[in-house]
């Protein structure tokens, strides 16, 4: 288990991370969410031992993270961390050896992952000759080439098209099924909802929300009802507990305070004609994020 | 626990070896290394054989100047012949000339022919007031050395004629003209050396290559660290190996590279020497003219330089090696605190200026013999390797001074290692120049930061 306990980090007088705590179990995908400058990258760098913590501690399997365990960690930085003059093979060997792997094992794993990402033909090509998306794939492969027990991914999906995002998510799920602890950061909440189980939302270095995604959604209570039919927007707004009514393409999205409001909305809809859709959904993570971060900024 | 620690040490040792090899191969296994070395080899071999190459392509440099003499005094040509033959022995390699006497009836013909040649006509006539007068006619007076020889010869002829007219016996004249007997006795142990020969040897073979290699090492270390830093690959590297290991790998690799490059330079010099021997020419370290190998060697033996080399060479090798380490450590630390390559190029300027100061001081050392300032500066690690070789050979310092310089250099390296690594550890993962010095000051003071 990875445990971050009451961690604080200062840059001079600026508090970048403020008393942050969370834990991630084996086989769990954990999302570190927040707007730019929230302290996500600083947290990753502290986990990797690149930055000293000013207070608190970080442990992996109850031991301080040091160079005795870093060979079992995979780290993908937000910005490209590839030596672009090297070929894909040379780059994989470079990072692989630094993770304590043998060259034979690196080449074996490299072939496997290059095939998996459909870029085997680029093995001997210089990284600078590759597209942004393929460079991102190489960076991801070098982070997982050692089959890490802890995988840290800082904005792993930036620069990727939807098909490759799907490919990345499949691989992340595969690593999760093998028991890896996976932490990642992203601005895209739809990605988080696809495979993330646990998360923390950070604002100005502080955790404002932490826990399992399903619990967070449940606790948030606010829900959405999607209706398609001949309904009156003004009438819907008159129902007690309805927060807002929006028209999205052909549908009407009704935001409600909690599930107790559903019955009242349904009663009104029953009276209307041409109803083709009535779907009750939990609030999206994006909504929760915006609501919680907005609240935090207002404070 | 002990097993885990031993395993960690072994793993880190392997990573250090890998990073060092990677850094070294990155410099050596490139087409540019091969191209640059081919160019260097061609340049050095060409320099060692420059006279052969110039001669091969032809020119007038072997053409003799013919000196035609019309002696209207009837006594001067014999004197002219003796004087000019003496000078010819002394300046055989520099001034090429022959001479011949002509009858006065050819004067006009010779003058008319002079316009199309480099020949010189000298007309010697009697003169009542000054005993004798000379007229020197040529199309152009290009050869200044030959001109000086002629002036000296004609002055001597005038004096001889003057002495003859004063009835001084021949034996007396011979004594007057015989070279002065000078007994050279040096009371000091310091031998008065031929500075030109010594500095002409030390500069091209030691100081200049060292200066060149230090500049290469300073640029190489800085640019490589900055490249890794600016691509953020540094974060991945440092998450797998401690900053110290990364730092040492760069220092070791750059020093091994410099060592290899130094050996290659020596090899190219040797190839130049061999090609010269094969081409049937003498080898000269002093610009391919003037002093040939035998003479040069005799000069070094006479001056006691050869005896000195027994201890000077090891001292110079130690100084050079330590200086390479010193400068590469400095470059590594500086590159870690800069944010990009442009910043590093600015920050390395003071290092290059310090090197230039040392370089020029080493040129000036023989001129300002016994300079207190130069001696003091030779103790400063930035200048030691540049100044000590010249000062030792010139006997301006003793071995004791050189050993003090080596100890000071070692102390500087220790300080750079002790505090520089702390700065490096903080610096390589820093991408902002805000409050930079405050952070480094804290890093140095922090006892846990090792």
Image (cartoon, coloured by chain):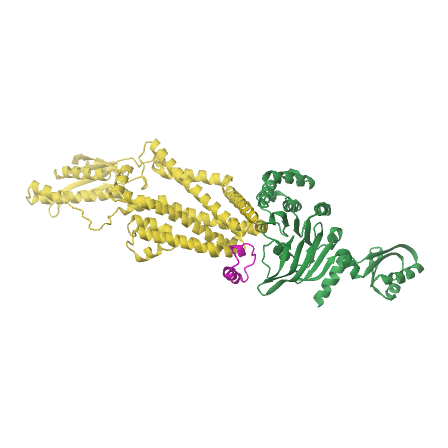
For chain B, the rendered hue is: yellow
In the rendered structure, the answer to whether residue A294 lies left or right of residue B57 reads right
Q: Residue at x 73, y 58 (%)?
A: A211
Q: Which residues are magenta?
A: B424-450
Q: Colour of chain A?
A: green
Q: Is residue B436 magenta?
A: yes
Residue A175: give x, y in percent of width and height. 70, 46
Q: Quadrant of residue B288?
A: top left
Instruction: Looking at the picture, tell me which residue is in the foreground, B32 or B237.
Output: B237
- Residue B389's spot in the image, x, y percent? 34, 48
Residue B158 locus on image (x, y percent) = 14, 44
How far across and down, in percent of the image, does residue A77 sit?
63, 51
In the displayed structure, B160 sits above or below A37; it is: above
Q: Residue furthest front?
A: B2
- Residue occupying image coordinates x 43% and y 48%: B324
In the image: residue B125, left or right of residue A55? left
Residue A81 visible? The answer is no
């Amino acid at each position: 288990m990875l445990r971050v306990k009451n961690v604080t980090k200062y840059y001079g007088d600026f508090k970048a991370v403020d008393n942050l705590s969370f834990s991630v179990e084996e086989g769990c995908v954990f999302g570190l969410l927040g707007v730019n400058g929230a302290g996500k990258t600083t947290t990753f760098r502290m986990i990797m031992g690149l930055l000293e913590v000013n207070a608190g501690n970080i442990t992996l399997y109850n031991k301080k993270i040091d160079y005795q365990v870093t060979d079992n960690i995979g780290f993908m930085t937000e910005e490209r961390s590839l030596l672009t003059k090297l070929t894909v093979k040379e780059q994989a060997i470079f990072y692989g050896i630094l993770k304590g792997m043998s060259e034979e094992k690196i080449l074996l794993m490299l072939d496997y992952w290059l095939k998996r990402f459909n870029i085997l033909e680029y093995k001997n090509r210089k990284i600078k000759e590759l597209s942004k998306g393929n460079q991102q794939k190489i960076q991801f492969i070098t982070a997982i080439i050692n089959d890490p027990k802890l995988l840290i991914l800082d904005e792993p999906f930036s620069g990727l098209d939807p098909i490759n995002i799907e490919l990345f998510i499949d691989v992340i799920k595969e690593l999760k099924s093998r028991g890896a602890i996976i932490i990642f950061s992203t601005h895209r909440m739809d990605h988080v909802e696809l495979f993330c189980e646990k998360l923390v939302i950070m604002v100005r270095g502080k955790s404002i929300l932490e826990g399992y995604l399903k619990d967070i959604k449940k606790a948030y209570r606010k829900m959405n009802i999607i209706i398609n039919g001949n309904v009156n927007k003004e009438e819907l707004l008159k129902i007690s507990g309805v927060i807002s009514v929006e028209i999205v393409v052909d549908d009407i999205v009704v935001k409600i305070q909690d599930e107790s409001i559903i019955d009242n909305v349904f009663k009104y809809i029953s009276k209307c004609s041409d109803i083709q859709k009535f779907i009750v959904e939990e609030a999206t993570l994006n909504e929760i994020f915006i609501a919680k971060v907005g609240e935090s900024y207002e404070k | 626990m002990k097993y885990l620690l031993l395993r960690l040490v072994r793993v880190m040792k392997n990573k250090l070896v890998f990073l060092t090899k990677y850094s070294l191969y990155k410099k050596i296994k490139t087409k540019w290394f091969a191209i640059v070395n081919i160019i260097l080899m061609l340049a050095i071999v060409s320099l060692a054989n420059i006279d052969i190459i110039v001669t091969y392509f032809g020119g007038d440099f072997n053409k003799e100047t013919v000196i035609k003499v019309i002696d209207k005094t009837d006594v001067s040509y014999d004197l002219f012949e003796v004087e000019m033959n003496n000078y010819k022995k002394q300046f055989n390699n520099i001034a090429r000339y022959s001479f011949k006497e002509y009858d006065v009836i050819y004067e006009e013909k010779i003058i008319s022919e002079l316009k199309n040649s480099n020949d010189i006509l000298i007309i010697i006539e009697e003169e009542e007031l000054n005993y004798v007068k000379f007229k020197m006619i040529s199309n152009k007076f290009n050869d200044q050395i030959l001109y000086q020889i002629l002036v000296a010869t004609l002055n001597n002829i005038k004096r001889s004629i003057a002495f003859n007219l004063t009835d001084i016996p021949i034996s007396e004249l011979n004594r007057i003209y015989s070279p002065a007997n000078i007994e050279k006795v040096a009371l000091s142990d310091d031998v008065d050396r031929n500075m030109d020969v010594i500095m002409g040897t030390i500069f091209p073979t030691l100081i200049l290559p060292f200066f060149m290699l230090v500049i290469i090492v300073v640029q190489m270390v800085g640019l490589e660290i900055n490249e890794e830093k600016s691509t953020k690959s540094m974060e991945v590297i440092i998450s797998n190996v401690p900053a110290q290991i990364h730092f040492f790998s760069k220092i070791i690799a750059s020093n091994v590279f410099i060592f290899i490059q130094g050996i290659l330079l020596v090899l190219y010099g040797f190839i130049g020497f061999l090609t010269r021997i094969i081409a049937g020419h003498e080898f000269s370290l002093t610009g391919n003219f003037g002093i040939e190998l035998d003479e040069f060697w005799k000069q070094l033996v006479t001056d006691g330089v050869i005896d000195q080399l027994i201890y000077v060479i090891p001292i110079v090798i130690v100084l050079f090696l330590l200086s390479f380490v010193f400068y590469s450590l400095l470059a590594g630390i500086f590159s870690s605190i800069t944010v990009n390559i442009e910043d590093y190029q600015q920050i390395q300027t003071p290092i290059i200026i310090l090197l230039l100061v040392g370089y020029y001081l080493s040129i000036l050392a023989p001129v300002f013999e016994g300079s207190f300032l130069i001696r003091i500066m030779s103790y400063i690690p930035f200048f030691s390797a540049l100044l000590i070789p010249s000062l030792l050979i010139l006997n301006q310092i003793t071995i004791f001074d050189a050993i003090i310089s080596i100890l000071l250099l070692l102390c500087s390296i220790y300080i750079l290692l002790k505090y520089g690594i702390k700065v490096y550890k903080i610096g390589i993962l820093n991408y902002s120049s805000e409050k930079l010095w405050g952070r480094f000051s804290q890093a140095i003071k922090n006892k846990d930061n090792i």
